[in-house]
Amino acid sequence: MFRPGSTIVVAIGGNALVHEGEPPTIAVQSQNVERAMRALVPLVRERHHLVVTHGNGFQIGHILMRVAAAAGEAYDLPLDVCVAESQGEIGYLIERALQNVLLEAKLSMPVVSLLTQVVVDARDPAFARPTKPVGPPLSSRDAKRLEASGVAVARERGRGWRRLVASPRPLEIDDVDTIRWLLRRPTLVVAAGGGGVPVVRRRGGRLEGVPAVVDKDLASMVLARGISARHLVILTGVRAVYRDFATPRARAIRRLSIDEALALADAGHFPEGSMGPKIEAAIGFLREGGRSVTITDADHLAAALRGRDGTTLTRTGRAPKEADA
C-alpha cells in the first residue's frame, strides 16, 4: 500500500465504463461507474489525494453519431466541443457515483468534476497524419464525400470506413494549478476526461480548440507529472498485463521494470490501441520520478495494491519500500 497522504492519479479506462456485450445505456454505465468508484473508497479512507481521469472512446463515438444524425437540423459541433461534452457526461456519472459511495462509507470529502483543457503543439506531426478512428462507421459514399472535403478516412477491418483525426502528444494540462489548489483543500477531483479537450496556444497565450483526440493514458501521465503524483493507477478491462495476450500462452505479469516493459513492447506483447499506450504512459511516469504504476481492473484493485494481483511497474521491478511509497 501507499504512504498515507500520497497523491495518486487513477485512470479509468473506457472498458471499465462500458463492458463488452452490455447494452450501452446510461443506467448500465452508472452501475459500472459506481462499481469502479467503490474500489477507490479505501484510498479515500487512507487520506490519499486522488485525481480520477477517464476515457471517452465509446461516448465520443455516440456523440458524433448524434451530430451526424442531426446534420442540417441542429448546429454542428466541432470535435473539441464533442470532447468537452463527453467530459460533462462522464464526469457527472463519476462525480455522482463517488458522492454516493463515500456517503455509504460515512466519509466526508468534496468531489468536483473539472472540465479540463490539454495543450498540444500545433506543429505536432500527428496533425499531418491523422490515425485515430472516431465516430460511427461510414458508407463508401459518405467516406468519399468527406475525403473530397479534406477529411482523412480509412477502411477499418470489420467496421467499414471511419473518419480519422489527429492524436497529438499532450504537452501540459492547462488547468493544473486549479487541480493543485483543489487537492490542497482537500477535494477529490475528476479531470482530464477523454484525454482532455485539445487546445493550442496562439499569439499572446490565447487558447484555441483543435480537431483532435488526445490519448487518455498519456494525458493522465502528463497530469500526474504536473501535480507531482507519486503513484499512477490504471483501471482497465483486464486483470493484469499479459505476455502473449489473447493466446493459449497468455500469462499474467505481476511485476515489471522499465527495461523489462521496453523489451516486451519491442517484442510485440503490447499492441497499439490496447495495452501499448498504457505501458508507454507507465514508463514515462516512472522515468519522470513516479514511484509506481498499478494496472488492473476494479475488482482486483485492493489485492493489486498489495502486490497480490494485477501488475505493478517500478523503475527496477522491485516494490518500493513502504517508507518511500
Image: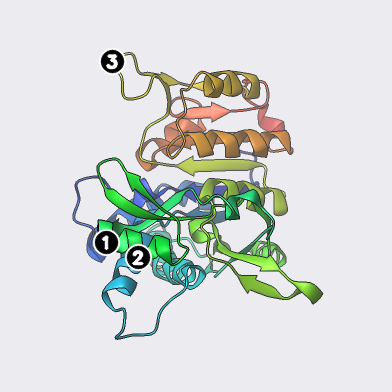
Give the x, y percent position of residue 260.
Answer: 59, 18
Mark 3 or mark 1: whose residue is earlier in sequence: 1
Mark 2 or mark 3: whose residue is earlier in sequence: 2
Q: How many marks?
A: 3
Q: Residue at x 27, y 61 (%)?
A: 141
Residue at mark 2: 145
Residue at mark 1: 141
Asked if disc 1 and disc 2 are in contact, CB closer than 8 Å, the reply is yes
Give the x, y percent position of residue 41.
Answer: 45, 51
Q: Residue at x 65, y 64 (%)?
A: 179
Q: CA distance from mark 3 to mark 1?
A: 41 Å
Q: Residue furthest right?
A: 204
**Residue 229 is at least partly visible in this image:** yes
Label 2 CA crowd tier, 10 Å (few <14, some 14–19, many 20+):
few
- The nearer-to-camera label among 2 and 3 is 2
Residue type at the position of mark 2? Arg
Q: Residue furthest top?
A: 249
Secondary structure beneath label 1: helix
Residue at mark 3: 248
Is 8 left, or right, of 143 in this rendering?
right
- The nearer-to-camera label among 3 and 1 is 1
Asked if disc 3 and disc 1 are in contact, CB closer than 8 Å, the reply is no
Secondary structure beneath label 3: loop
Residue type at the position of mark 1? Arg
